[in-house]
C-alpha cells in the first residue's frame, strides 16, 4: 500500500483500542480481521504492527500457507523466531520444532514462553492468511488463546473467512473484536491515487477507480498503469484482463518454468526452494531439470517471488489466476506427483492433503497414494487415517483390477481406526465380489473387530460360522475365523464356555503360527477373562498382544490396569496414546473410553461426564455403539451419584435406543443401572426384582460387574425387602469371587470384606474393609468404606468414632460431587444428634453467584491463590489442559476475563462469609 492507510480509520480505531487496553491495563484480546483477497488485510496488519511498536508493545508476526510446507504447526512455531527480537533463541526453537508431532506438548511450551514474555511486555501477535491454517496450527492457536486468557496478549488474525471466532477462539472469556473489511469508498481510492501520483487523478481515471468495487489491490494496479495512461473497463473486465495477462505470461514461459509456476499454485502458493527442482522433476518426469535456472525464469516473469526459503506468488490473486488456468486433469496430476513426493519424504500429512485433492472417481493411482498415507497415519492421527481410507474406497470403482487389493487395505485401516459402520460396509462389498473362500474368510476375520465395537456380536458369530463352513479353507484362515468366533462367544456364551472356546482358538492359532490369528485369539481370551472379572488373566493376554507388536488394544490394556487399581501404570500407558492424556478429537473412541473410566474410578465426575459426552458423539458417528453404551452408563452413574435422577433416567433411555447392540450385551448393563436408579428412587422391591436375575445367572458373563460395588450404599435396605436376603448374599458372593480371582487388589478385597461384614454384622470385618478401601485410589470406595464403618460404629454405640468416620465419608463424597450419598450421610449424622457448619455452607450458597462444579471450585481456588495452570495441575493431579477447561468455565460463569478479577471475586467472598468458592484446605483437595 502506498503512503498512509486509507479508508480504515474506524477499523484501526477499534484495533488500537484493544492494543492500548493491553498496554495500559494488561487486558488481552483477539482481533479477527476478515475479508476477500485483495481487500487490504495485510496492509491493516502491517499498520497495527507499526503502531503497536510505537506504543512500546512487543510485536511478532507470521503467515500461513495453503498446505503446510515445513511441518504441521510451522506457522505458529515460527512466530517464536520472528521479528528483530525473537522470543526464542535458536536452540530453544529447535527443541520446540522437534516436538511438533506432539501438539499438546508444543502448546504447553509455547504458552509458557509467551506467558513469560507477556509478563515483561504486553505482546501483539499477528498471523496472516489464517484461512490456510493447518490442523495442528489451528489446535495450537485455540489452545494458546485459551491458555493465555487474562494475560496482556493481543492476537491479530487475518483471513478470508468470516466467523473466525468459532474456529480459533472456543468461546473463551476474552475480548474478541471482529473487524470485517469491506470495499473502500471511491474517495479513499482517489486518495490512494493521489498518494502515489502526487496529484489527483482525472475524471476518466476516477471512473476506473469507481468501478473497482473498492478493491485496494486492483486500485494499486490501476494506479501503476495510470502513469502509462492505461484505459479499461469495469470490475469484470479488469478481472478478465488480469487473468488474461497472467495466462499470457504463463504461455510466454519455457515449458519447465510454466510447470513450476503451476506446481507452486497446486502446492498451495508456496514451495520450499530446496525442493522445487526435485518436485518439478517428479511432476514432469524430467529428473535432469535445472531448478535454479527455471526458478529464475519464473521470478523474472513477475509471477513468483522468493519468500524466505520458499517460492510463492507476489499476491493471492496471481495464484488464483494461475490456478484457474490449470485444467482439472493437469491439476489432479500435479497433486498426485506432490502426494507421491511428500509420501516418499515422510511428510505424511501433506501427502494426505495432496492425495485428497488428487482424488477423482476411478483414479486408482490417487486412491493408492491416499490409502498409503492412511496406513502411515493410523498411529499418529487415527481420525485422519480413517477419513483418508474412507475417501480412498469411495474413489475406487468395482470394475478396476486394483479394486480388491486396495479395498482390503482400506478395510484394515477402517477397522484399526474404529470406524465400525464404514468397515462393515466395505467388508460386505468385498465379500460380495469374492469367489475364493479364503479371501471371504480373511475379510470376515478382519471385520470382526468392527462388528464387536458396533455391538453386533450375534452377526459376528453368524458370519464366522458361515465362512467356516467352506470345505477348502486354509488352516491359517480357519484359525483366524475361530478366533473371531471366540470373540463373539465372549459376549454371548456362558463364562466357562467363552473361556474354553477362546483358549482353544488360541491354541490352534499358535499351532498354525499365524500372528494375526494369535493376536485375535488373545483378544477373545482377554475379553472373556475380563467379563468373568479375571482381570489379571485379561491383562496378561493384552500384554502378550503388545509383545507381538499389536498395539491396537492398548486402550483395553489400560482398562484392565484400572480395574486392578494400577492407575499410575494406566496413565503412563495412556500417554502413549494421547501425550497429555487430554480429550483431543483425533483420539480413537476406545481411548476416550479409557480416559472416561479413569476419571470415573478416581472420582473426577465432571471430567468423566465430559469425556462420556464426547465418546457418545464420536461413537454414534463412527458406529462404535458398544462404546456409546459405556458412555451412557457412565453418564447415568455420574448423575446418580450427584443425585440428579431425571438426567440419569434420560441417559438410560438413550442407551435403550441403541438397538444395533445385541440384547446379550445391552440388557445386563441397562439392568444394573435401572436397578441402581430404582433403589435411588426408593423403590427397593423393584430394584431387587431387576437385579436378582443377573446374580442368579452366575454362568453368564456380565462386563458391568465392576459397577456392583457401587451398590454398597443400599446394601442393608435392599436386604430388608422380600427376596432381598438372596440378593445381598449373592452380591457378597460375587464380590468374594472377584476378589479371589484378583488377589492383592485392595478395592476388590475391601468391597468383598465390606459386603460380607455388613451381611454378618461383623464390626471388625467392616473396620478391616474400611482400612483397605481407604488405602485404595477410588474415591467412592474410600467414602463407602468410611460410610459403612461409621454407621456400624453408631449401631454399636460408639458414637464419637462413628461420627468421625461419617464426617470423613461426607468430605470424600463432597470432594467429588457425589451429592446423593453425601445427603444420606448427613441425614444419618443428624439423626445421631450431630450438626456441622459445613452443611450450612453447602445448603445455602450465595444466590448471586453462578454455581460452579466441585472441580471448578478447586481450580478457581488454586488459580485465585496465585497458582499457574501448571502448578495447579500438579497440585490436583490432573493435566494442564483439564485445568484450562475448568478455568474457562469459571471465567464464563463468573463473567470475568482475568485471573486478577478471579482473585478479587474470591477475596470478596472471604470478606463476607464462607462460600463454596473459598479456597479448600490441602486435605480437602482429592
Image (spheres, rainbow, N blue to C red):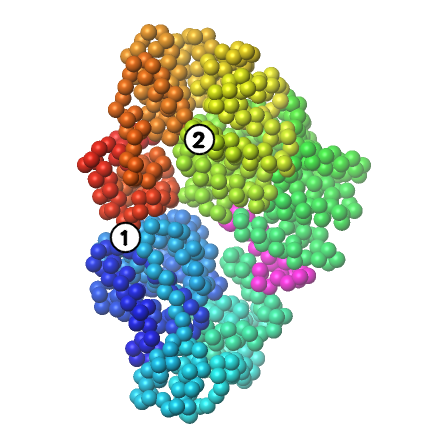
Q: Position of residue 213 (x, y in %)?
A: 44, 78
Q: Which residue appears at 42% of the width and 8% of the height?
A: 762
- Give the camera-side residue of 360 and 625: 625
* Mark 1 lies on residue: 151
Query: Is residue 360 covered in magenta?
Result: yes
Question: Residue 54 appears in which quarter of the rendering?
Answer: bottom left
Element under disc 2:
loop
Quarter the N terminus occupies: bottom left
Earlier residue among tags 1 and 2: 1
- Give the camera-side residue of 91 and 105: 105
The number of callouts visible is 2
Q: What segment carries the magenta color?
A: 355-381
**Is 106 on the left or on the right of 633, as rendered?**
left
Question: Residue 463 appears in which quarter of the rendering?
Answer: top right
- The overriding secondary structure of the stretch rendered in magenta is helix
Quarter the C terminus occupies: top left
Q: Which residue appears at 30% of the width and 11% of the height?
A: 799
Q: Position of residue 359 (x, y in %)?
A: 62, 62
Specify whether residue 57 is in view: yes
* Mark 2 lies on residue: 644
Q: Residue furthest left?
A: 911
Q: Is residue 743 above or below residue 645?
A: above
Q: Residues within 10 Å of mark 1 (few under 14, many from 20)?
A: many
Q: Which residue appears at 46% of the width and 90% of the height?
A: 231
Query: Is residue 373 covered in magenta?
Result: yes
Q: Nearer the viewer, mark 1 or mark 2?
A: 2
- Give the camera-side residue of 482 and 198: 198
Q: Which residue appears at 33% of the width and 75% of the height?
A: 7
Amino acid at each position: 500500500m502506498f503512503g498512509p492507510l486509507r479508508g480504515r480509520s474506524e477499523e484501526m480505531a477499534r484495533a488500537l483500542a484493544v492494543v492500548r487496553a493491553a498496554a495500559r491495563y494488561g487486558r488481552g484480546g483477539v482481533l479477527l480481521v476478515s475479508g476477500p483477497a485483495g481487500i487490504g488485510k495485510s496492509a491493516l496488519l502491517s499498520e497495527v504492527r507499526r503502531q503497536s511498536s510505537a506504543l512500546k508493545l512487543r510485536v511478532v508476526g507470521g503467515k500461513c500457507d495453503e498446505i503446510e510446507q515445513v511441518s504441521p504447526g510451522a506457522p505458529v512455531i515460527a512466530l517464536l523466531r520472528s521479528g528483530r527480537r525473537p522470543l526464542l533463541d535458536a536452540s530453544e526453537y529447535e527443541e520446540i520444532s522437534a516436538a511438533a508431532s506432539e501438539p499438546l506438548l508444543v502448546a504447553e511450551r509455547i504458552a509458557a514462553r509467551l506467558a513469560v514474555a507477556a509478563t515483561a511486555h504486553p505482546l501483539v501477535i499477528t498471523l496472516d492468511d489464517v484461512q490456510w491454517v493447518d490442523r495442528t496450527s489451528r489446535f495450537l492457536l485455540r489452545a494458546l488463546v485459551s491458555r493465555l486468557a487474562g494475560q496482556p496478549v493481543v492476537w491479530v488474525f487475518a483471513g478470508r473467512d468470516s466467523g473466525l471466532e468459532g474456529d480459533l477462539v472456543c468461546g473463551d472469556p476474552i475480548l474478541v473484536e471482529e473487524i470485517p473489511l469491506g470495499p473502500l469508498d471511491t474517495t479513499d481510492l482517489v486518495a490512494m491515487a493521489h498518494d502515489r501520483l502526487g496529484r489527483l487523478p482525472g475524471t476518466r481515471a476516477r471512473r476506473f477507480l469507481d468501478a473497482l468495487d473498492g478493491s485496494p489491490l486492483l486500485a494499486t494496479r490501476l494506479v501503476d498503469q495510470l502513469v502509462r495512461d492505461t484505459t479499461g473497463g469495469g470490475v469484470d473486465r479488469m478481472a478478465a484482463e488480469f487473468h488474461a495477462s497472467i495466462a499470457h505470461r504463463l504461455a510466454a514461459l519455457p515449458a519447465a518454468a510454466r510447470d513450476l509456476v503451476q506446481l507452486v499454485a497446486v502446492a498451495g502458493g508456496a514451495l520450499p526452494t530446496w525442493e522445487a527442482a526435485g518436485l518439478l522433476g517428479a511432476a514432469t518426469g524430467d529428473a535432469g531439470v535445472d531448478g535454479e535456472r527455471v526458478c529464475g525464469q519464473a521470478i523474472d516473469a513477475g509471477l513468483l517471488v522468493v519468500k524466505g526459503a520458499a517460492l510463492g506468488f507476489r499476491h493471492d490473486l496471481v495464484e488464483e489466476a494461475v490456478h484457474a488456468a490449470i485444467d482439472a486433469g493437469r491439476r489432479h496430476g500435479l497433486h498426485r506427483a506432490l502426494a507421491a513426493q511428500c509420501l516418499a519424504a515422510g511428510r505424511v500429512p501433506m501427502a494426505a492433503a495432496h492425495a485428497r485433492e488428487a482424488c477423482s472417481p476411478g483414479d486408482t493411482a490417487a486412491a493408492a497414494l491416499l490409502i498409503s498415507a492412511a496406513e502411515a497415519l493410523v498411529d499418529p492421527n487415527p481420525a485422519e487415517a480413517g477419513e483418508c481410507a474412507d475417501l480412498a474406497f469411495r474413489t475406487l470403482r468395482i470394475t478396476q483390477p486394483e479394486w480388491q487389493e486396495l479395498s482390503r487395505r482400506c478395510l484394515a485401516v477402517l477397522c484399526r481406526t474404529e470406524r465400525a459402520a464404514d468397515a462393515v460396509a466395505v467388508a460386505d462389498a468385498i465379500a460380495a465380489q469374492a469367489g475364493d473362500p479364503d479371501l471371504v474368510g480373511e475379510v470376515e476375520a478382519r471385520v470382526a473387530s468392527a462388528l464387536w465395537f458396533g455391538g453386533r456380536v450375534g452377526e459376528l458369530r453368524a458370519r464366522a460360522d458361515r465362512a467356516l463352513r467352506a470345505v477348502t479353507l486354509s488352516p491359517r484362515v480357519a484359525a483366524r475365523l475361530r478366533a473371531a468366533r471366540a470373540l463373539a462367544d465372549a459376549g454371548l456364551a456362558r463364562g466357562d464356555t467363552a473361556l474354553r472356546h477362546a483358549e482353544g482358538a488360541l491354541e490352534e492359532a499358535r499351532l498354525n503360527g499365524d500372528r494375526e490369528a494369535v493376536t485375535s485369539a488373545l483378544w477373545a481370551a482377554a475379553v472373556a477373562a475380563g467379563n468373568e472379572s479375571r482381570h489379571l488373566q485379561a491383562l496378561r493376554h493384552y500384554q502378550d498382544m503388545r509383545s507381538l507388536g499389536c498395539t491396537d488394544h492398548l486402550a483395553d490394556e489400560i482398562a484392565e490396569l484400572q480395574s486392578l487399581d494400577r492407575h499410575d501404570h494406566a496413565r503412563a500407558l495412556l500417554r502413549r496414546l494421547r501425550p497429555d492424556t487430554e480429550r483431543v478429537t483425533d483420539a480413537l473412541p476406545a481411548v476416550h473410553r479409557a480416559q472416561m473410566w479413569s476419571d470415573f474410578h478416581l472420582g473426577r465426575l465432571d471430567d468423566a461426564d465430559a469425556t462420556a459426552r464426547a465418546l457418545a458423539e464420536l461413537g454414534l458417528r463412527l458406529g462404535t455403539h458398544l462404546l456409546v453404551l459405556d458412555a451412557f452408563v457412565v453418564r447415568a452413574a455420574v448423575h446418580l451419584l450427584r443425585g440428579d435422577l431425571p438426567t440419569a433416567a434420560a441417559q438410560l433411555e438413550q442407551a435403550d435406543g441403541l438397538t444395533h447392540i445385541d440384547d446379550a450385551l445391552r440388557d445386563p448393563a441397562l439392568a444394573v443401572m435401572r436397578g441402581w436408579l430404582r433403589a435411588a428412587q426408593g423403590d427397593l422391591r423393584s430394584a431387587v426384582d431387576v437385579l436378582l436375575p443377573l446374580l442368579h445367572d452366575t454362568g453368564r458373563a456380565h462386563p458391568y460387574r465392576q459397577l456392583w460395588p457401587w451398590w454398597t450404599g443400599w446394601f442393608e435396605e435392599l436386604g430388608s425387602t422380600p427376596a432381598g436376603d438372596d440378593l445381598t448374599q449373592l452380591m457378597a458372593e460375587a464380590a468374594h469371587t472377584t476378589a479371589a480371582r484378583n488377589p492383592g487388589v485392595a478395592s476388590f478385597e475391601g468391597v468383598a470384606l465390606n459386603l460380607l461384614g455388613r451381611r454378618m454384622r461383623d464390626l471388625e470385618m467392616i473396620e478391616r474393609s474400611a482400612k483397605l478401601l481407604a488405602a485404595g485410589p477410588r474415591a467412592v470406595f474410600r467414602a463407602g468404606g468410611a460410610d459403612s464403618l461409621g454407621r456400624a460404629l453408631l449401631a454399636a454405640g460408639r458414637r464419637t468414632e462413628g461420627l468421625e468416620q461419617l464426617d470423613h465419608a461426607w468430605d470424600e463424597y463432597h470432594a467429588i460431587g457425589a451429592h446423593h450419598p453425601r445427603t444420606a450421610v448427613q441425614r444419618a449424622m443428624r439423626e445421631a444428634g450431630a450438626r456441622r457448619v459445613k452443611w450450612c455452607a453447602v445448603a445455602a450458597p450465595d444466590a448471586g453467584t453462578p454455581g460452579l462444579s466441585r472441580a471448578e471450585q478447586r481450580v478457581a481456588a488454586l488459580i485465585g491463590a496465585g497458582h499457574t495452570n501448571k502448578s495447579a495441575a500438579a497440585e490436583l493431579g490432573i493435566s494442564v489442559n483439564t485445568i484450562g477447561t475448568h478455568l474457562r468455565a469459571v471465567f464464563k460463569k463468573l463473567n470475568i476475563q482475568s485471573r486478577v478479577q478471579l482473585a478479587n471475586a474470591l477475596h470478596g467472598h472471604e470478606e463476607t462469609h464462607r462460600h463454596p468458592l473459598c479456597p479448600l484446605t490441602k486435605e480437602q483437595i482429592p
